[in-house]
Image (cartoon, grey):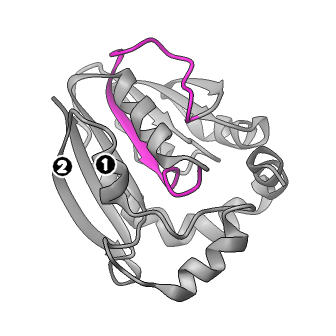
Amino acid sequence: MSLRHTYTLIAPLYDIFIAAASKNVRATSLRQLPQQGSLNILINGIGTGLDLPHLPPCHRYTGLDLTAAMLKRAKPRSGGLHLDLVQGNSMSLPFVGEYFDYAVLHLILAVVPDPLACLRETARVVKPGGSILILDKFLKPGETAWIRRTLNLLAQHTVTRLDVVFEEVLAGVPGLKLEADMPVLAGGWFRSIRLVKD
């Protein structure tokens, strides 16, 4: 089953499983965005729009998702935000290079089949000096985590990957500097990360 098909099917149920558990960590991550100015910000993998209530209203946002079903659920959450919703692939972004001041990758790097392509594409469309905010679940380098790796054999084909090592992904995208990395949920399995593009 393709990722597009799976997330089209689970769109009506997504918030039931994700919204409450991720609300506080999303809000904390998004407080890193400037509260003034008029920046161009990409929400790469916007899903049902759970980030939208936590965004400063002063910026211009572009929300991208693979499925129309997710975008349909995100639209009512846009409120007074200046938001454009785009259906597209996070691993091959339909945007020109060096356009966005910030990019937000909340619960997307460990969902896509190729997290390296997703991060590389995000870095491509962010301006030099721009930041990428990441919130996701990652294995630690060298971590055995045999239960997660075993479950990944099924999960990676349906809803998410459980075997992504962030450090390995970051090593494949030169020009990104790690500025912050904090454990936020599940004993550090979920991390809040900020990168800056050289």
Q: Mark 1 or 2 closer to N-term? A: 1
The foreground one among 166 and 7 is: 166
Q: Residue at x 62, y 62 (%)?
A: 160
Q: Give the percent coordinates (x, y) of residue 14.
A: 70, 60
Tag in front: 1 or 2: 1
**Element type where label 1 sits in the image:** helix
Q: Give the percent coordinates (x, y) of residue 36.
A: 21, 28
- Magenta part of the protein: which range? 90-112
Dot 1 and dot 2 residues touching (CB under 8 Å) = yes
Q: Give the percent coordinates (x, y) of residue 106.
A: 46, 51
How far is disc 1 from disc 2 in space, using C-alphas?
9 Å
Q: Which mark is residue 170?
A: 1
Q: Predominant secondary structure in magenta? A: loop
Asked if residue 97 is among those painted magenta in the image, a careful observer would answer yes
Three-letter code for the amino acid on which mark 1 is drawn: Leu
Q: Is residue 28 visible?
A: no
